[in-house]
Structure formats: C-alpha cells, structure tokens
Image (cartoon, rainbow, N blue to C red):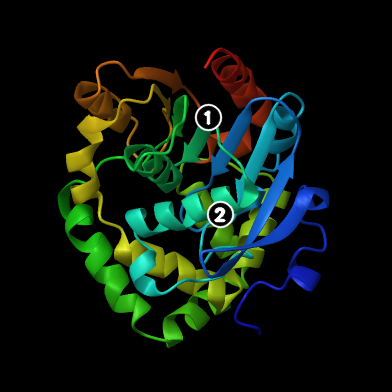
C-alpha cells in the first residue's frame, strides 16, 4: 500500500477531475480544481476531507462563479509541509501563497468545519474578502473533556509511525468508514462513503489529518476572532454531532453582526447530503455579497 493518495489510481473517477490541476506554491504541490466565471469563490474543506467534499456544490456554484477548491496541505493529493505549518496560521499563510500563485483574489470564502477557521484566519491576516460563509464551522475551542484531550492525543498519535498504517488498514472495511461518517449526523450516499474510504486507506492522508489535529489551536484563534470585520454567515446544521449547532450562536454573541442560518435534518456534512438545497441558500448570499 502506497503512503500517499495516487492520482493515477485513486482519482480514476474523482469528482470534477476535469477541472483538476497541480500547482506549486509555498514549497508544496497543491491539487486544485477551478471552473466557472464571475465573482470568485474559494472552497475550503474540513479536517480529513479533500475536494471531493464539494463534489455536488462545485458544479452548481461554477455555473455562475469563478470557483477554486483545493486539497488542504497534507490532505488528498496536496503535499504535506513541515508539521509546524499544519496549524491554523501556517495553513492560512500557505494558502495565501497558493492564491497569489493562482492570481485568485476571492470575493467569498466558504469554509466547512476547520476550513471556516482557516477562512477567518486569512481575513484576520489581511486577505481582502467580501464575505465568509462558515458551514458548521469549528470556530471555537471544544468544551469539556474533548477540548482537553483533542490536540494532546493527536500529538501523541502523530508521533507513532505505525498509527496511520493501522488506521488505513481499518479503513479497508468500508462499513467502519460508513459508521464514522454516520456518527457525524450525516447520511452520505455510496459514492461519498467510497471516496472517504479511499482516502483513509492511504496512510499519507491519515498522517496529514493527524498532523493538522495535533497543531490545531483554537484558543489563540478565539482571542483574535472578535477582530474579524468581514461579514460572516454562520450555517448550522441542527443534526450535527461533530460541531454543536449552538457554536454558531456562541460565535454570534462574539460577532453580533454575523447572521445565523439553521438547517434542520442535516448533519456535519450537510453540503454533501443536500448540495442542491445548500446551493439554494448559498447562491443569493454569494450574489449579494
């Protein structure tokens, strides 16, 4: 089993692959997908995912926007930087270098889960953007025991070289992956489950996911969050079992100008469950930003 996802094999039916390219920036080779014309929209997926997460949303938005989706560092088909650059700030700086290489100045950033924190960090660090849409955004530190052990445990695991291989071996059982995804509160179709399973069978993708988790510090980020001046839309799926829907209301108390949109019946991967329904919500937001 090869360490990293292999484009020739793993991308044989990759969603929207006709729009895929590989771009050098910040010392990495990035997998990006770009299509469409109009206002520029940047799509940032969450931890453990890749561009496939936007498989339904991407073509819908590209019908009226210039859309750029990317695999985060260490995820999917993008390269893995040094571990110190896998935190929020490091990822934001590397993505800013990629955007400069692509000559892509986004009008709108749509970030899912951890991708929402990266979107906010980009804006806090000076990227001129007209609106951020946080989709089940991981914008505040986890509370309780989970908040105390999340990063320390990830740091321990990322230091054990056999762990990514062990996870990849377990991912060979698609039922295991299906249960993990169902535990987020979302019900994905067979294709969605198969794509996640394909990635998690690759130890390199698992290692990148663990490295991101190990470096993730939302405490420092939360101290800067009140400085965010970019208009923010907070989409909360009410069946999300990964990020509490109440997180959106907590963020709104910090940023009173932010708007909250609640989606009943959808889980953490809401944009994968119902891309058309979600697109109907996002489209007018994009057009009026």
Residue 38 position within the rendered picture, expressed as x and y whole percent measured from the top left: 70, 25
Measuring from the top left, give residue 68's x and y in whole percent.
64, 42
Q: Is residue 281 shown above or below 275?
A: above
Q: Position of residue 193 (x, y in %)?
A: 64, 54
Q: Name the side, left or right, on which 13 lies relative to 176.
A: right
Image check: 62 left or right of 211?
A: right
Pick whichever, 182 or 273, lies toward us.
273
Q: Is residue 176 above or below residue 143?
A: below
Label 1 environment density (alpha carbons within 10 Å; few <14, some 14–19, many ≥20): many
**Residue drawn at (31%, 58%) of the image:** 216
Gap between marks 2 and 1 measured at Cα: 16 Å
* Residue identifier under label 1: 108
- For the question of whether residue 17 can be seen, the reply is yes
Q: Nearer the viewer, residue 118 or 229?
A: 229
Mark 2 neighbour class, 10 Å CA radius: few under 14, some 14 to 19, many 20 or more: many
Q: Which callout, 2 or 1, points to the residue nearer the camera?
A: 2
Indicate the secondary structure of the residue bearing disc 2: helix
Image point (77%, 27%), residue name: 63
Q: Residue 60, position in %: x, y? A: 73, 29
Residue 43 shown left or right of residue 83 in the figure: right
Q: Earlier in the sequence, mark 2 or mark 1?
A: 2
Location of the N terminus by quadrant is bottom right
């Amino acid at each position: 089993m090869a360490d990293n996802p292999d484009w020739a094999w793993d991308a044989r039916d990759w969603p929207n692959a006709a729009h895929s390219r590989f771009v050098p920036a910040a010392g990495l080779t990035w997998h990006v997908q770009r299509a469409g014309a109009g206002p520029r929209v940047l799509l940032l997926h969450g931890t453990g995912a890749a561009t496939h997460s936007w498989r339904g949303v991407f073509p819908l938005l590209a019908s009226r926007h210039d859309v750029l989706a990317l695999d985060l560092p260490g995820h999917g088909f993008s390269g893995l930087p040094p571990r110190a650059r896998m935190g929020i700030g490091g990822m934001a700086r590397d993505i800013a270098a990629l955007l400069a290489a692509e000559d892509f100045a986004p009008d709108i950033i749509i970030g899912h889960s951890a991708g929402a924190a990266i979107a906010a960090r980009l804006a806090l660090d000076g990227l001129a953007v007209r609106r951020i849409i946080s989709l089940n955004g991981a914008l505040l530190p986890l509370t309780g025991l989970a908040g105390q052990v999340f990063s320390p445990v990830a740091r321990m695991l990322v230091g054990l070289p056999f762990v990514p291989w062990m996870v990849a071996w377990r991912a060979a059982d698609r039922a295991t992956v299906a249960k993990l995804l169902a535990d987020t509160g979302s019900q994905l179709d067979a294709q969605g489950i198969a794509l996640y399973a394909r990635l998690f069978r690759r130890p390199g993708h698992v290692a990148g996911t663990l490295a991101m988790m190990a470096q993730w510090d939302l405490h420092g980020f939360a101290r800067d969050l009140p400085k965010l001046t970019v208009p923010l839309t907070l989409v909360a799926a009410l069946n999300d079992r990964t990020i509490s829907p109440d997180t959106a209301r907590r963020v709104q108390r910090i940023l009173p100008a932010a708007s909250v949109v609640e989606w009943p019946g959808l889980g953490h991967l809401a944009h994968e469950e119902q891309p058309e329904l979600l697109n109907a919500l996002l489209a007018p937001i994009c057009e009026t930003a």
